Amino acid sequence: MARKPSAELAAGVSEVWEYAPAPESRDVVSIAPEYGLFIDGEFRPAADGATFATINPATEEPLTRVAEAGGADVEAAVAAARRAYESTWGPMPGRERAKYLFRIARVLQERAREFAVLESLDNGKPIRESRDVDVPLAAAHFFYYAGWADKLEHAGFGPSPRPLGVAGQVIPWNFPLLMAAWKLAPALAAGNTCVLKPAETTPLTALLLAQVCSDAGLPAGVVNVLTGGGDTGAALVRQPGLDKIAFTGSTEVGKQIAAAAAGTPAKVTLELGGKAANIVFDDAPVEQAIEGIVSGIFFNQGHVCCAGSRLLVQESVADIVLDRLRRRLTTLRLGDPLDKNTDIGAINSQQQLDKITELAASGDAEGAERWSPSCQLPDRGFWFPPTVFTGVSQSHRIAREEIFGPVLSVLTFRTPEEALAKANNTPYGLSAGVWTEKGSRILWLAQRLRAGVVWANTFNRFDPASPFGGYQESGYGREGGRHGLAAYLDV
Ligand code: NDP
């Protein structure tokens, strides 16, 4: 590592550390030329032979081809899950089910590096995040719910809570492995069997997890993985015979799923979008708040449903907070996701990059002021620099719509009442953050913010024991913790 002056000196940053590249080896991962669907304990091609490519969004290099499940495959997977539910997994005592979950958790830990590299290759997120957040949290979910499997009668749902049956689960591309763990671990612990549909752009870690389930000796049909696009997801949630539908993704698709499930016996939970307020008061510890603002919106390129995408900062400290924020952003490193020094990786797809670009352009057109640190974007792949908009008003699209990218909209307020009113002025209600040294103010706001999660003097903290979920257009139902079990039990 060498210290040398750089362009940032001109931007008022006194000194910048340049790092030598520290790439994680991709040799730890071997990617097959083609992958099948995981149905009834084995990998097989789609019934009609359809496949699609998955690419590395940081380079646009094709990684492999993956089977695209059609209607016949969906039917076969749900039938396999039904058989497994009735013959093996449903009747199995909880203490036996727990052993499989513990085994999966341990294998995830043992193969953590492989999972982390594969996730970064397929998703574009920095290895630092896949290594330190996604994979450990995925293992933690399996450990946590393994602990519940033989204690369901003590979970507060009556003396002998029963599973629902077969769960159809559709997950997005922002945390592919972690979302799979959020869905599978509580469902399996409660005694359900699963058909999981990962996102089209990020199928690989779900398929590796299927392999781990197989290696762990999980009985055939208990977990099935159907790769494919939106049509596969639509076919799955409309397949008769599901007792449960769990979806994480956009509010638009969530509404379609709720409409399709209406009138069917399937119980539904939806974890949808967000437009969280991160509220900074004048008595907040500024340096900590800056770190919280940065991790709130730039973690995972802002591809986070609970991202702190609206910064509400008290007018009296707005200048100092924004000044320090800009300085901090000049130190973020954007580039190769496999480099251990990288803070900001690639945008997951061209489609998502187009959406971010379009919404940011609307910020310019509506009169907000755009700022980004000087940073060189790689020539190939999908990239968007960390971006801050000031002069944002509540009517601007960038203050109302979920951008799902590294774009922060800054608004100011004068009183706690104004902060509360602005924070709640959204159709969403997933999360919020409060930065202040006054405990009474934190409690006052936490009771009034219409958000499923309120973080105080921190942001984007996740724990398998904590329930997570939203209000209004952010969906309904809770994942995580004891509450997450209720979503998979007949209670
Ligand atoms: P989607 O909601 O389309 O995707 C989520 C999952 O649902 C994917 O597996 C997707 O498949 C699948 N899917 C798509 N259409 C249907 C359907 N009609 N029925 C059942 N399943 C379906 O999100 P996008 O990836 O298109 O992202 C669009 C926007 O959604 C983002 O810009 C962001 O604002 C928001 N989003 C929010 C997330 C959150 O966690 N709250 C997560 C992801 C996105 P496939 O990917 O293969 O098309």
Image: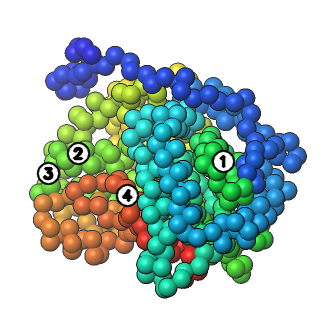
Camera-side mark, 2 or 1: 1
The disc labelled 3 sits on which kind of residue? Pro
How far from the left and from the top, in percent, is residue 425?
A: 38, 68
Q: CA distance from mark 2 to mark 4?
A: 22 Å
Q: Earlier in the sequence, mark 3 or mark 2?
A: 3
How far from the left and from the top, in percent, is residue 53?
A: 71, 35
Secondary structure of the residue carrying numbered label 1: helix
Q: Residue at x 55, y 47 (%)?
A: 176
Q: CA distance from mark 4 to mark 1?
A: 27 Å
* Numbered badge on residue 214: 1
- The CB of the residue at mark 3 lies under 8 Å from ligand 1: no
Secondary structure of the residue carrying numbered label 3: loop
Label 2: how many Cα within 10 Å (few below 14, some 14–19, many 20+) = many
- Whether residue 261 sits left or right of residue 396 in the image: it is right
Q: Earlier in the sequence, mark 1 or mark 3?
A: 1
Label 2, on which residue? 290
Label 4: how many Cα within 10 Å (few below 14, some 14–19, many 20+) = few
* Numbered badge on residue 463: 4
* Numbered badge on residue 169: none
Q: CA distance from mark 1 to mark 3?
A: 49 Å
Camera-side mark, 4 or 1: 1
Q: Residue at x 77, y 58 (%)?
A: 77
Q: CA distance from mark 2 to mark 1?
A: 44 Å
Q: Residue at x 48, y 61 (%)?
A: 146
Label 3: how many Cα within 10 Å (few below 14, some 14–19, many 20+) = some
- Whether residue 109 sits left or right of residue 35 in the image: it is left
Q: Earlier in the sequence, mark 2 or mark 4?
A: 2
Q: Is residue 203 above or below residue 188?
A: above
- Whether residue 255 sits left or right of residue 221 in the image: it is left
